[in-house]
Amino acid sequence: MRKIVSVGVFAILVLTMLFGSEVLADRYLQFLLRGNYHLAYEMQSLRARTLYTVENMSQEFQQLSEEYGAYLFIFSTETSEIRGFTVFIFHAQFERGFIDFNVVVDDQGRIDTFLVQPTLQTGAIAEYIDTSKFDEFEITIGEDRNRLPAVITVPKEIDKYPLVILIHDSGAMDRDSTIGPNKPFRQIAWGLATQGVAVLRYDKRSFVFGERLSQASPSIETEVIEDVVNAITAVSRIPSVSSIFLAGHGLGGRVAPVIATRDSRVDGIILLATPARRELQVIIDKQKYIRSLYGEETGQQTKLLTDYLQTALDGKLPPGAPVLAATAGYYYELDRMNPIEIVRELEIPVLIVQGDADFESTVQDYIMFMNALWTRLNVYFQLLPGLDHYFMPVKGDMSTPDHYYEFRHIDSQLIDAMFSWIYIFD
């Protein structure tokens, strides 16, 4: 029997060499889910065999069945590389909850680690999400040394659908715009896909190639714009896509109008929590707000920083002078991308959405957009009560940085606002 098992596993390893380690990870998990524990055991490294025996497998999956009911399906997969190991996280739905299966594959094509992580948070998936209504596929955007991993979320059983490309805020952000325990972009993607809208999200270039980019002069063109254009090119080749919308969050909303003026393939743009003020002014005001929250603990340090930022805001620093993680020239480049003036030139539909509890992009910014653009018939406005910069609900009148590290959901108000607007202009 052992010889037969070994031959079967050898065949699997050959398939892995041909199609990649995800084939092996998926097959390993399927063996476990079907109770083929001896086959799964043979796929493990020597180290893993001593830690995770056939008996361990049987006991763990019996307990999993008792607590969560029958396994239903895998609805999403995440992939990452850590020190030569490939980590796959399979998000699975059971009758009574959701489970994350972590499968780690070593460089020899063996399973090195397996971890079951039942969701610790209650309500891990928002009520407006139905994972049976969409599929997710890993793709890449761009070419050669700037190729980026991405994921496209596609509604099931729909021949034609609009597609939204999500554009990150500032910083080195992953595809989900992860902050603390929250994944805002993933929730937006799943919420829209549940209602029939496809979404593409990708790992930002500064997230994937941060070390390499730190050695070059920062530019909004290379940090954001080039990759969004590559994303547009990728999705424009999909026959089922009926229209393409850009949805930029924060800084992403500042550059979305710029891209729309250059690329006629864009059918509409959404500005999510996008400041109308200059970027350095936003940062200065944010620092002052944080100082008001935490008092003298950060007072002197914050004052020194805001004084330096004000010097840059006044244009008194040379372009190459360091400012935060960039240069003064980077912020001068952003100043030339005035979202109000650029939106005024656009003929395509524009939706501006703002949460009224946001301390980064504030109601003040929203009013600035309204005062300047209210006569434009192609521009629409939506102010959502009680939501912060990531469109998550907060208690009280104004959010704080501490709220970002509390587990919460994107509010359904945002999903409904985006979907109803997209539906009109698709």
Image (spheres, grey):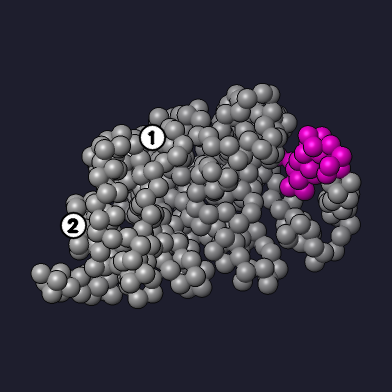
Give the extent of the magenta segment. Answer: 276-299
Q: Which of 306/407 is in front?
A: 407
Q: Which of 408/322 is in front?
A: 408
Q: Quadrant of the C terminus?
A: top left
Q: Position of residue 89 (x, y in %)?
A: 39, 54
Give the mark nearest the N terminus, 2 or 1. Answer: 2
Question: Which residue type does callout 2 highlight?
Answer: Asn
Q: Is residue 132 magenta?
A: no
Q: Of circles 2 and 1, which is in front? A: 2
Q: Is residue 79 left or right of residue 323?
A: left
Q: Quadrant of residue 99?
A: top left
| CA distance separating discs 2 and 1 | 32 Å
Q: Residue at x 62, y 69 (%)?
A: 211
Q: Position of residue 139 (x, y in %)?
A: 39, 60
* Residue bearing the label numbered 1: 129
Q: What is the number of the mark on residue 36? A: 2
